[in-house]
């Protein structure tokens, strides 16, 4: 049977929450990892060129106004530099490349050199700048070289971020795949856990909707009868007193029905325990049958029987058994008998196939002897089990169906 609209909405919310969780988690993990790696690689690149520029700036020096570059010929930092140049500028004047083991085409143009020189003069410490050289954007570090109290030269070291960017791109691809697998696993686990967490809510919704269906079923017949009685009394003044008495009887029956429905709802919700008290089963069945609008079609045979039970719940079970027999008995008489711990309802209708005799005790299942909403016999079985008893169907001798409600005998304990 398809789920109810409320349950379907809850399931849709569950799936939407799972997808939102998966997407948000994946995005956060990916953005965090990518940004962290990008910043880390940028910092590593800056630190690398900065350390190299600072180290080389300490190996060269001015002697009587002459820049000494001899140490660069043997310095490992200079020999392993990807891009290297020494800038020098007269006072005043634009900087020029004094020393460049790197090809000039791989170094910044004059405008770039002017920019670097201006920043070094302004900050008077190692500066970082991204400049195009040889058709590529290169990360540069420029460290000042002092001649007395002025900056007279600068060591310019560059590194191409393309290799680092390629490694970053590979990491992003791996992270994307890894995050996808991780998030899918986490989303699957979260979906299972949310499903378990929602079970009480789904069960509560199912019980609520089942209760509404059962309440509508239980109240439909007495309300329709009450309407007919009131209309009869209002159209015929001579029948008014009889109609009034009948209406009062029906109102009392409706009150008991509502009380029984609320009692069953509380028991199913777990807010009330079933209170079993000793009661006369035969008297309960007689009263319940007398209240039925079609009680004239019922033959009642009883003997004194005492059971431990809840009168409201047992009355509902008996009412459902008899009404089902009247509805599906083909207009033939219905026999009801009560013996010790047993209520038997016999009709002469078409019966029900053996393969369906257990299924009709399930809720939402309709069958030849079930009411239109598929709740009547399910309630009977439920009430029987609350009383440690059972309900069963079997073919009646000579045709028809035999429905039995079996209850444990009364004990004084």
Image (tube, rainbow, N blue to C red):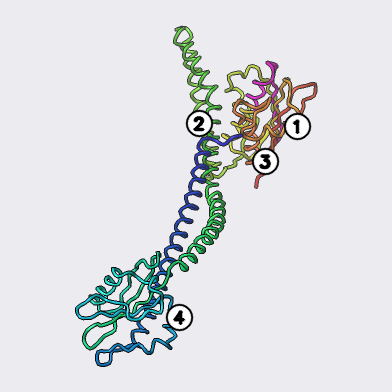
Which residue lies under the disc numbered 4? 80
Residue 287: give x, y in percent of width and height. 59, 26
Q: Are marks 2 and 1 in contact (CB under 8 Å)?
A: no
Which of marks 1 and 2 precedes in the sequence? 2
Task: Identify the element where label 3 is drawn.
Answer: loop
**Dot 2: few (<14), some (14–19), or many (≥20) neighbours within 10 Å?**
some
Which residue lies under the disc numbered 2? 258
Of tags 3 and 1, the one toward the viewer is 1
Which residue lies under the disc numbered 3? 410
Q: CA distance from mark 2 to mark 1?
A: 34 Å
Q: Residue at x 50, y 37 (%)?
A: 6
Give the residues drawn in magenta, as a range. Answer: 321-340
Residue closer to the observer: 385 or 96: 96
Q: Are marks 1 and 4 in contact (CB under 8 Å)?
A: no
Which residue lies under the disc numbered 1? 355
Which residue lies most toward the bottom here? 64
Q: Residue at x 65, y 45 (%)?
A: 412
Does residue 241 sit above or below 411 in this rendering? above
């Amino acid at each position: 049977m398809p789920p109810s609209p409320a349950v379907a909405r809850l399931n849709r919310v569950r799936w939407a929450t799972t997808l939102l969780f998966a997407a948000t988690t994946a995005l956060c993990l990916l953005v965090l990892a990518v940004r962290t790696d990008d910043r880390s690689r940028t910092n590593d690149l800056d630190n690398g060129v900065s350390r190299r520029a600072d180290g080389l700036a300490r190996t060269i020096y001015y002697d009587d106004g002459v820049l000494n570059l001899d140490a660069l010929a043997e310095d490992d930092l200079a020999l392993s530099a990807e891009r290297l140049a020494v800038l020098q500028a007269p006072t005043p004047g634009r900087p020029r490349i004094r020393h460049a083991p790197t090809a000039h085409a791989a170094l910044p143009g004059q405008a770039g050199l002017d920019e670097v020189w201006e920043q070094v003069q302004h900050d008077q410490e190692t500066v970082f700048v991204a400049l195009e050289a040889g058709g590529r954007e290169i990360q540069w570090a420029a460290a000042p070289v002092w001649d007395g109290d002025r900056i007279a030269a600068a060591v310019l070291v560059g590194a191409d971020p393309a290799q680092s960017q390629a490694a970053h791109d590979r990491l992003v691809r791996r992270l994307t795949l890894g995050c996808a697998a991780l998030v899918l696993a986490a989303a699957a686990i979260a979906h299972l856990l949310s499903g378990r967490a929602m079970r009480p809510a789904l069960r509560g919704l199912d019980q609520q909707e089942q209760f509404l269906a059962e309440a509508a079923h239980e109240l439909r017949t007495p309300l329709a009868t009450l309407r007919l009685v009131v209309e009869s009394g209002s159209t015929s003044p001579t029948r008014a007193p009889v109609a009034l008495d009948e209406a009062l009887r029906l109102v009392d029956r409706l009150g008991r029905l509502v009380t029984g429905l609320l009692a069953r709802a509380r028991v199913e919700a777990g807010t009330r325990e079933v209170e079993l008290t000793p009661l006369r089963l035969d008297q309960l069945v007689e009263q319940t049958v007398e209240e039925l609008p079609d009680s004239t079609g019922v033959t009642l045979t009883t003997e004194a029987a005492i059971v431990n039970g809840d009168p409201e719940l047992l009355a509902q079970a008996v009412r459902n058994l008899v009404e089902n027999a009247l509805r599906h008995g083909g207009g033939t008489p219905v026999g009801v008998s009560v013996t010790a711990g047993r209520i038997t309802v016999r009709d002469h209708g078409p019966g029900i196939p053996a393969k369906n005799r257990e299924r009709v005790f399930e809720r939402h299942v309709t069958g030849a002897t079930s009411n239109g909403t598929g709740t009547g016999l399910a309630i009977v079985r439920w009430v029987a089990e609350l009383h440690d008893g059972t309900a069963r169907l079997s073919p009646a001798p000579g045709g028809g169906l035999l429905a039995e409600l079996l209850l444990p005998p009364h004990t004084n304990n």
